[in-house]
């Protein structure tokens, strides 16, 4: 039976902190908690984030060592029973916290995930292990102008896009017909090379093949080894009814072809809706300014106005309608994208003052003015208030 630690074990544990304490977790922490704690502390103390800080480097080694032991069930069980002494003299298995080549290999994936930005990359490589050996093509943007009536009804359009397409001569391989790319001699097809400096192992894209894992000794003359050539393509675009200004339509895999057979990028079509001569748009609603004559506003009547679908709508004008009055035509606006609903159309009338009057017309208007009493309450009310305002200043 084991009643307590030996003097050698106690001495060893005095020199090292408890692994659970190092990671800031309890002894019953599960794998998810352990990994989360390690990620947080490793990012905090990584040497690339703390250049020249030996203290941070030491702490990074400490949290890495703790996680390497506790993430393995067998090592964790041995540590829980014997403490740090479990890994003295080879105890705990050959994969103990000695941090040899096996450790570098087992930790490379998580380091790449955590510290890609420190190591000069943006995450996992496009080439080499775990990915394609060919780079993805670039996304493209196409700006397209459409009319408001097209946005109302939707349309199918043909567009011509200059882009890079797969070379037909080499079928995208980049190699001259009859030959093929060969394995990169520098990285042995891995797409990456490793360099070690003490405790750290840094993995970077291979400088010879640039992460592809292969090299081309005899390139295709048609595409100069790129596996793609420039060409103008004709594409069909379906514009749904109800699109708004600035809407983006994505055509998957219609962008540039990838280098040497890599996957294609996407094409993004940005829609710009041209101004309409009758309508202004606000979301799904339409607004139209309609001038009416002074007599129509005074006496009332009916007018016909155009609607966005090319039809007519009849609007009744009440007697005494003032300029700026709005009339709502329900459901006569724009369709709501991907639904059966429509917005409304609003008619705003403006009363037009008559011009080019004849002598007779002027005489009739003067006669009307001389007999007018309560026909213009708004203007009469305004000037009554104005006189009171002037009187307050003693004018």
Image (cartoon, rainbow, N blue to C red):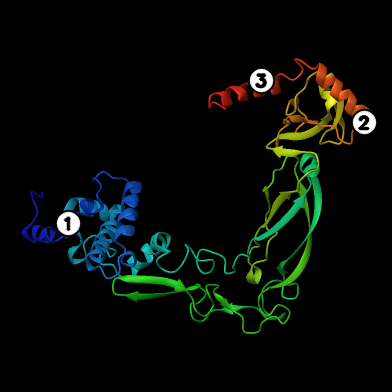
In the image, residue 196 lies at what x, y percent?
Answer: 34, 75
Q: Residues within 10 Å of mark 3 (few under 14, many from 20)?
A: few
On screen, residue 339 above or below 223: above
How far apart marks 2 and 3 lie (CA) works out to 30 Å
Q: Position of residue 302 (x, y in %)?
A: 86, 23
Marks 1 and 3, how far apart at CA: 88 Å
Q: State the residue position of label 2.
A: 359
Q: Quadrant of residue 136?
A: bottom right
> Which residue is rendered at x = 75% and y = 15% of the image?
374
Question: Quick one: 153 or 27, which is closer to the camera?
Answer: 153
Say few, some or many: other residues with alpha carbon within 10 Å of mark 1 (under 14 / 14 to 19 / 20 or more).
few
Which residue does the numbered mark 3 point to in the structure image?
381
Q: Is residue 189 left or right of residue 329?
A: left
Please tell me whether residue 273 is drawn above or below residue 372 in the rendered image. Answer: below
Q: Residue furthest bottom?
A: 218
Spatial separation of the CA atoms under disc 2 and disc 1: 107 Å
Return the disc, 1 or 3, that comes first in the chain's sequence: 1
Figure disc tally: 3
Q: Residue furthest left?
A: 7
Name the quarter where the C terminus is drawn. Answer: top right
Mark 2 or mark 3, whichever is nearer to me: 2
What residue is disc 1 on? 17
Is residue 342 depicted above or below 24 in this figure? above
Question: Which structural element holds mark 2?
Answer: helix
Q: State which mark lies toward you, 2 or 1.
A: 2
Report crowding for label 2: few under 14, some 14 to 19, many 20 or more residues within 10 A (C-alpha).
Answer: few
């Amino acid at each position: 039976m084991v009643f307590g630690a030996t003097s050698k074990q106690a001495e060893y544990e005095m020199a090292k902190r408890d692994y659970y304490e190092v990671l800031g977790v309890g002894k019953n922490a599960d794998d998810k908690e352990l990994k989360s704690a390690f990620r947080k502390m490793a990012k905090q103390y990584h040497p690339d984030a703390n250049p020249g800080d030996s203290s941070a480097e030491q702490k990074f080694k400490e949290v890495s060592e703790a996680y390497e032991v506790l993430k393995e069930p067998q090592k964790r069980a041995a540590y829980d029973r014997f403490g740090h002494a479990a890994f003295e003299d080879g105890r705990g298995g050959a994969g103990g916290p000695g941090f040899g080549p096996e450790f570098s290999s087992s930790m490379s994936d998580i380091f790449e995930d955590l510290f890609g930005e420190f190591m000069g990359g943006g995450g996992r490589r496009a080439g080499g292990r775990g990915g394609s050996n060919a780079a993805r093509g670039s996304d493209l943007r196409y700006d397209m102008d459409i009319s408001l009536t097209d946005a109302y009804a939707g349309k199918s359009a043909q567009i011509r896009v200059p882009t890079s397409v797969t070379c037909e001569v080499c079928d995208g391989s980049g190699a001259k017909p009859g030959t093929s790319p060969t394995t990169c001699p520098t990285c042995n097809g891995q797409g990456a090379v490793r360099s070690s400096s003490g405790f750290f192992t840094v993995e970077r894209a291979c400088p010879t093949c640039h992460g592809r894992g292969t090299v081309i000794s005899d390139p295709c003359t048609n595409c100069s080894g790129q596996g793609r050539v420039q060409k103008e393509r004709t594409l069909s675009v379906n514009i749904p009814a109800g699109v708004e200004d600035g809407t983006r339509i994505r055509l998957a895999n219609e962008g540039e072809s990838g280098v040497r057979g890599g996957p294609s990028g996407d094409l993004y079509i940005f829609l710009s809706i041209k101004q309409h001569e009758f309508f202004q748009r606000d979301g799904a609603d339409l607004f139209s300014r309609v001038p009416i004559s002074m007599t129509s506003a005074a006496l009332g009547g009916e007018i016909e106005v155009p609607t966005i679908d090319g039809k007519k709508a009849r609007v009744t004008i009440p007697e005494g309608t003032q300029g700026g009055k709005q009339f709502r035509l329900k459901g006569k606006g724009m369709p709501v994208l991907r639904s059966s609903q429509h917005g409304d159309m609003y008619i705003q009338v403006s009363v037009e003052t008559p011009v080019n009057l004849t002598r007779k017309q002027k005489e009739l208007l003067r006669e009307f003015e001389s007999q007018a009493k309560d026909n213009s309450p708004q203007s009469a009310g305004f000037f009554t208030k104005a006189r009171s305002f002037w009187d307050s200043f003693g004018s």
